[in-house]
Amino acid sequence: MTTQCFVNGKVFTGTGADDFVSAFRIRDGVFDWVGDASDVSTEDVFELDGATVLPGLLDVHTHPGFMASLSSSVSLLPPSVSALSGLLDRLRTHENFGRDDDSWIEGFGYDDATFPDGHPTRSDLDQVSTTQVVFVRRSDGHTACVNSRALELAGITRDTQDPAGARFERDEHGEPNGVLTEIAAVDAVERIRPKRSQEDLVEGIVSLNEHFLSLGIVAVNDLYADLIPEPLRLFRLAADRGFVPSVILFVGWRAGLPDLTEAERAGPVRIGGVKLFMDGAYSNRTAWVVEPYPGSDDHGLRTVDDDELRAAVTWARRNNVQVAIHEMGDRAATHVLDMFENEEPWLGELPSIRLEHASLFSQEMMTRLARARMRFGVVTHSIFFFAECTSYARNLTDAQFAVAYPIRTFYERVPLVALASDAPATAWEDADNPFTSIQAAVERRAHDGSDFNQAEAVTVGQALHLYTGRAAQLSALDRVGLIAPGYRADFVVLDRDVFTLGSDEIAGTSVLRTFVDGAQVYSRG
């Protein structure tokens, strides 16, 4: 039996926004005591020398499988790429540029809201190549743009009907302009994409190890694991090869989805839920909203019908896992409440239904959550408004702006709530750096310094609570998120005291060391 005792730190336990101790003990990879350093009598201690310590951080809405699949794409994320010319220049640096016609030129992460010259089209991407496919995804993952060669190979013409809940955008003559709006339209080209080998994908997952651990992230939920084939098998292979973070996978809903086996629902890498999309995103005006978008009568897109929504919930109930519903618009969220608020939950203290992104949420909607028989959880973000302020300024009315990402009110009124990144489907290069999100949540300012409803600001402790103890309550991750007896000894040591920094310095915080099960798995430099 191995025992370690750490003393004289500023140890945030994750049990509340203002809960600290100065020492803790680990026995066989588990915290078995926390308290005051003055109560430690043994000489065999690890001296923290006043360092700030946090529980291992949790990102309960991210996409590591998608990250692994994007290793063949050049990054088009802001702030490095902020104009069409920069996007085209970056694509010309792709390793496949100028190769044979079967080699795709791919990019990910553009945010056209920052482009003075507007959204790219097929004619723009034709400047990169007319013989190779050029395929670029927008930062939110709901829109893509392709060149003429891609449309030709995918068979998309002026006579092609739009997929359900999606659009092939068209020019003034009715011809497809290369913009693919919503996932079903993107998939029409994605299906002809050359497949990466499973070995490459496994190695891509393993390569993310240092990325997560250097950010202090020890456990994640992959909220659309099907973006790679056989995700459970590949993630388990990656874990066998040294990928450290625990992973709960959410598979995309489809009719006929087979029931899960006990083995698929067990272990540090397992399937824990099913995901479906109720609507789109604000950046391309496809979030399903009550009040129309400014200057229009457009209410966005609904992307799943009631029969499919209910079928997914029935499947999740039968398989004893969570349902995660992508809903950005207030109409989408309200519709989910209308359908399920009076139904019986099936996962005990764990939320049976998760509302993902929860962008517009009024006080009335929060009251309905509190009174609901169903046990709902909420995942929200600060990195969204930080990174995409231009889109929100363009696409929200004043009334919508007042209830956008109400993090403080969520914290006070919704027990089962967490902050998360949605990386890489977020328009910022380090979108899953928790300290960037924490600074945004504390300051309520976007990257350009603009105010984003500072009445909804939270404290550093509250923001961290949403990445630790509160996130653990929302997710099916096991015994993580707290420095408390009986929990896994996952913790991080910071290079500065994030609780006393000026608010504009928080994002500069770095992780010095990350421990998982009491063993150091990352050290900076």
Image (tube, rainbow, N blue to C red):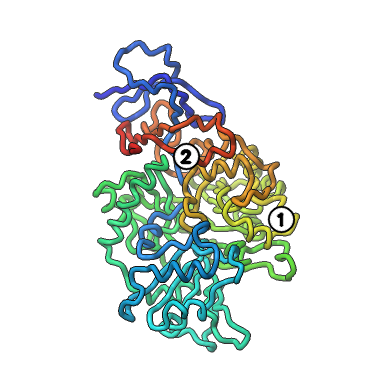
The answer to which of 332 and 309 lies nearer the viewer is 332
- Tell me if mark 1 has few (under 14), some (14-19) or many (20+) residues whose alpha carbon lies within 10 angstroms of its own: many
Residue drawn at x 41%, y 67% is 256
In this rendered view, identify the residue nearer to me: 322 or 522. 522
In percent of width and height, residue 291 lies at: 73, 62
What's the residue type where badge 2 is placed?
Ala
Which label was assigned to residue 400? 1
Q: Nearer the viewer, residue 248 or 434?
A: 434
Q: Which quarter of the rendered picture does the N terminus lie within?
A: top left
Q: Which quadrant is the C terminus positioned in?
A: top left
Residue 481 to residue 393: above or below? above
Q: Residue at x 63, y 66 (%)?
A: 285
Residue to which mark 2 is pinned: 472
User: In this rendering, would 466 be left or right of 6?
Assistant: right
Residue drawn at the location 33% of the way across and 21% of the way down:
46
Task: From the viewer's side, name the closer residue of 91 and 375.
Answer: 91
Type of amino acid at the residue the image marks with label 1? Gln
- Mark before the other along the chain sequence, 2 or 1: 1
Q: Which mark, by number, is residue 202?
A: none
Question: Residue 407, how many percent across, how many down?
Answer: 62, 44
